[in-house]
Image (cartoon, rainbow, N blue to C red):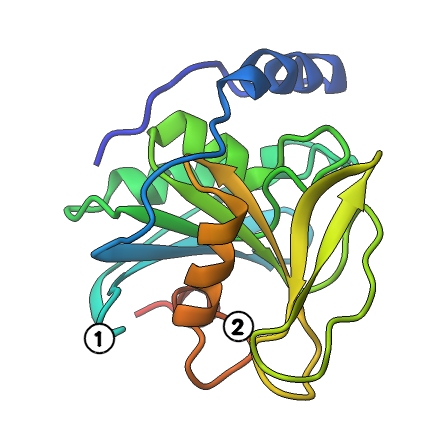
């Protein structure tokens, strides 16, 4: 598949923030409500700066794996809160460009608009690819939320500066929630529906679970 090169990779904090500011207005928070094939994306670190990005495409109906790809590289951008995506984007873009299958939804291990600058990894990848994208975080990042009820499917809004930017969603009864936010061309309602559809057994969606395993244990 093709990823649009909308900017060079930044070397400084100021350059990275300028890229986020320029691309943020392109984010759309409406789009399709159903998807035939979905991709999970994750990155694993070897030491401090060596990264392996993994993308796993699944059939959305059966959750069977359609395609797997990886890419390795160096994380050349420093760790800066709110700009962490720039450490992982080059390897993730390289992995996406190796896909023969174009996914209809990107499910990112990270955040979308639930981000201090309103432009997390899922937003960035969605804008670069033009594909619907959503973020699913393992831990809370920004904003405030009440604990959802213990039953599967319960959720509470995540609010930041009086705006709703995501939801804490319970994917298994009595298990810690995940933190869902739209990235691009997906509504919050659709992102919530998809995260529940894609988590039939475990806490994390199947696409992310597969990508996490592949990033750690490449074929």
> Between 41 and 191, which is closer to the camera in this rendering?
191
Left or right placement of residue 42 versus residue 20 in this view: left
Name the disc covering residue 144, or none: none
Q: Which mark is residue 62?
A: 1
Q: CA distance from mark 1 to mark 2?
A: 16 Å
Q: Position of residue 75 (x, y in %)?
A: 59, 39
Which residue is located at x 44 percent, y 52 percent? 190
Q: Position of residue 103 (x, y in %)?
A: 25, 48
Residue 26, horizontal then vertical, whole percent: 49, 18
Q: Quadrant of residue 77?
A: top right
For the question of whether residue 209 can be seen, the reply is: no
For residue 104, side relative to residue 184 (left or right): left
Specify the quadrant that holds the N terminus.
top left
Q: Residues within 10 Å of mark 1 (few under 14, many from 20)?
A: few
Q: Going 68% across and 30% down the picture, which residue do you hit?
A: 118
Q: Locate the C terminus and report the quarter of the image it occupies.
A: bottom left
Label located before the other in sequence (1 or 2): 1
Q: Residue furthest left?
A: 100
Residue receiving disc 2: 204
- Relative to the observer, which residue lies in front, 147 or 102? 147
The kind of secondary structure element at disc 2 is: loop
The residue lying at 64 percent from left, 84 percent from top is 151
Query: Can you say whether 173 is above or below 83 in the image?
Result: below
Q: Is residue 195 above or below residue 19?
A: below
State the residue at coordinates (48%, 42%). 187
């Amino acid at each position: 598949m093709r990823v649009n090169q909308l900017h060079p990779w930044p070397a400084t904090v100021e350059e990275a923030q300028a890229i986020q500011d320029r691309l943020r207005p392109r984010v759309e928070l409406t789009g399709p409500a159903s998807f035939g094939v979905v991709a999970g994306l994750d990155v694993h670190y070897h030491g401090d700066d060596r990264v392996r990005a993994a993308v796993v495409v699944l059939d959305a109906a059966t959750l069977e794996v359609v395609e797997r790809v990886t890419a390795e590289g160096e994380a050349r951008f420093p760790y800066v809160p709110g700009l962490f995506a720039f450490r992982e984007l080059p390897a993730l873009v390289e992995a996406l460009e190796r896909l023969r299958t174009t996914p209809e939804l990107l499910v990112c291990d990270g955040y979308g608009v639930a981000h201090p600058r309103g432009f997390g990894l899922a937003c960035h990848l969605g804008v670069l690819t033009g594909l619907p994208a959503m973020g699913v975080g393992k831990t809370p990042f920004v904003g405030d939320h009440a604990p959802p009820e213990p039953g599967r499917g319960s959720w509470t809004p995540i609010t930041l500066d009086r705006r709703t930017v995501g939801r804490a969603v319970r994917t298994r009864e009595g298990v810690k929630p995940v933190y869902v936010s739209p990235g691009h061309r997906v509504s919050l309602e659709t992102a919530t529906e998809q995260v529940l559809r894609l988590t039939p057994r475990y806490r994390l969606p199947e696409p992310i679970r597969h990508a996490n395993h592949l990033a750690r244990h490449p074929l």
